[in-house]
Amino acid sequence: MANVIISFTHPTDRVDGNPILPGEITDVQVSARVQGSPVWTEIAVVDFPGASVRVQDVAPGDWEYQGVVRGVGADSAPLTAQIAVPFAQLGPLATFDATLE
């Protein structure tokens, strides 16, 4: 298991080049899925102006995270990030002895 920090920078302009006005962004929806899965699961909603979230105890595997800016009017297109959470090595034997018979 590992902790993953998701961080992002809020947009200042719309896709047409016009500025985003104060109060138009309400939050960022963060979703996750195991890479290759068709289903996204919402894991956090970060209220504006927050710009990060800590995801705790992420299981080993290849993960995808998605962020969508939400607010007044239409939501943004999603952006994704990928991360591989490694499997932790097994601990050593508790005891290991050799004796003469």
Image (cartoon, rainbow, N blue to C red):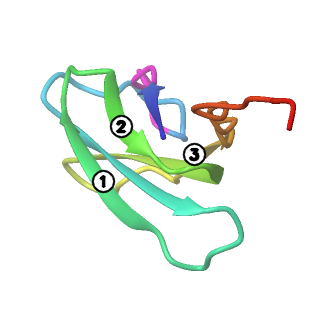
The disc label shown at residue 55, or none: 2
**Which residue, given by chain and number where applicable, does mark 1 sit on?**
43
- Image quadrant assignment for residue 94: top right
Query: Of the residues shown, which amino acid type is indicated by label 1?
Result: Ile
The three-letter code of the residue at mark 3 reads Leu
Q: Residue at x 74, y 29 (%)?
A: 97
Label 3 neighbourhood size at 10 Å, few (<14), some (14-19), many (20+)? few
How far from the left and from the top, in percent, is residue 86? 69, 39
Q: Nearer the viewer, mark 2 or mark 1?
A: 2
Residue drawn where x is 26% and y is 47% of the image: 44
Q: Which residue is mark 3?
A: 79
- Judging depth in this view, the residue of 22 and 54 nearest the camera is 54
Label 3 to label 2, Cα distance in Å? 17 Å
Q: Nearer the viewer, mark 3 or mark 2?
A: 2
- Per the picture, the main secondary structure of the magenta-coloured stretch is loop
- In this view, the residue in front, 21 or 77, is 77
Q: Quadrant of the C terminus?
A: top right
Q: Are marks 2 and 1 in contact (CB under 8 Å)?
A: yes
Segment colored magenta: 8-14
Residue at 23%, 25% (x, y): give it: 21
Describe residue 13's horizontal placement relative to residue 80 as left or right.
left
Q: Is residue 29 left or right of residue 34?
A: left
In the image, residue 49 sits, relative to residue 71, either above or below, namely above
